[in-house]
């Protein structure tokens, strides 16, 4: 199970709206295995397929602490069915925006419907870190990043910093993606 590279800001693929998973075949199972391996190695507590450049509506998550047994979870085609009016603030990070953390306010509780690896439909009610992480990962599937909830000043500053680092690393030109667009685009759209 190979590690996959995690794409980072300002890669424009992070703005793609991922497409639903219709069947779980060997390729999807391999992707899920690789997402877990890549997420644990990072280390991270969640990883969406688009973060390894695959525009499918899947993410993995494991909120177990170091001293606890692993709790690997896969979410396919997740949808937020309900979000609380009460809001909660968490300091969020993102493996696609390494070493940058900021407080983000979101609904404190959510109910999410998703499919498991057998495409059986499940529902989960979440609060605390689970609710935050579910919303963060579902955002990835819609081309939304946690920096989109920050002030324009903070967002522009972090995008600029990562764009500068990417230019430096590529010797003048960005690598896979180009400038990070602020508007999500569809996985099936021309140029998407
Ligand atoms: O989607 C991602 O980029 C993964 C991200 C998930 C996340 C973190 C915090 C709030 C909401 C969503 C991460 O995993 S960042 C790394 C991180 O938080 C962490 C890493 C090791 C141990 C504990 C936390
Ligand atoms: Zn993220």
Image (spheres, grey):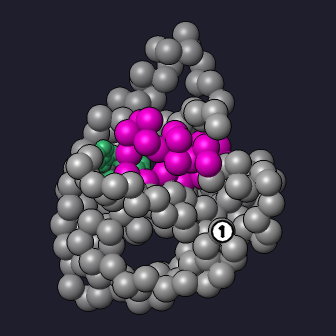
Residue 173 against residue 25 in the figure, above or below: above
| Magenta span includes 50 | yes
Residue 12 against residue 88 in the figure, above or below: above
Residue 178 placement, left or right of 182: right
Q: Depth check: give the residue in front, 46 or 8.
A: 46
Q: Which residues are magenta?
A: 33-54
Q: Quadrant of the N terminus?
A: top right
Q: What residue is drawn where x is 20% and y is 61%?
A: 90
Q: Depth check: give the residue in front, 191 or 124.
A: 124
x and y percentages locating residue 25 in the rendered image: 80, 60
Element type at marker 1? loop
Label 1: how many Cα within 10 Å (few below 14, some 14–19, many 20+): some
Res 76 quadrant in image = bottom right
Q: Which residue is mark 1?
A: 117
Q: What residue is drawn where x is 33% and y is 79%?
A: 126
Q: What residue is drawn where x is 38% and y is 39%?
A: 43
| Magenta span includes 17 | no
x and y percentages locating residue 73 in the rendered image: 48, 64
Residue 171 against residue 185 in the figure, above or below: above
Residue 158 placement, left or right of 169: left
x and y percentages locating residue 64 in the rendered image: 31, 57
Res 185 quadrant in image = bottom right
Picture mark count: 1
Residue 128 placement, left or right of 78: left
Residue 82 at least partly seen: yes
């Amino acid at each position: 199970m190979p590690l996959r590279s995690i794409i980072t800001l300002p890669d424009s693929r992070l703005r793609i709206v991922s497409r639903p998973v219709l069947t779980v075949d060997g390729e999807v199972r391999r992707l899920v295995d690789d997402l877990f391996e890549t997420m644990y190695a990072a280390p991270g507590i969640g990883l969406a397929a688009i973060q390894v450049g695959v525009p499918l509506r899947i993410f993995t998550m494991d909120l177990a602490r170091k001293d606890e047994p692993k709790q690997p979870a896969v979410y396919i085609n997740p949808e937020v069915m309900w979000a609380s009016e009460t809001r909660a603030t968490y300091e969020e990070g993102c493996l696609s925006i390494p070493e940058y953390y900021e407080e983000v306010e979101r609904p404190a509780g959510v109910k999410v419907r998703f499919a498991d690896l057998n495409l059986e439909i499940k529902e989960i009610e979440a609060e605390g870190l689970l609710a935050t992480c579910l919303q963060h990962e579902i955002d990835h599937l819609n081309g939304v990043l946690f920096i989109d909830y920050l002030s324009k000043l903070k967002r522009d500053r972090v995008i600029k910093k990562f764009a500068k680092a990417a230019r430096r690393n590529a010797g003048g030109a960005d690598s896979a993606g180009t400038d990070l667009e602020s508007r999500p685009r569809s996985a099936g759209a021309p140029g998407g």
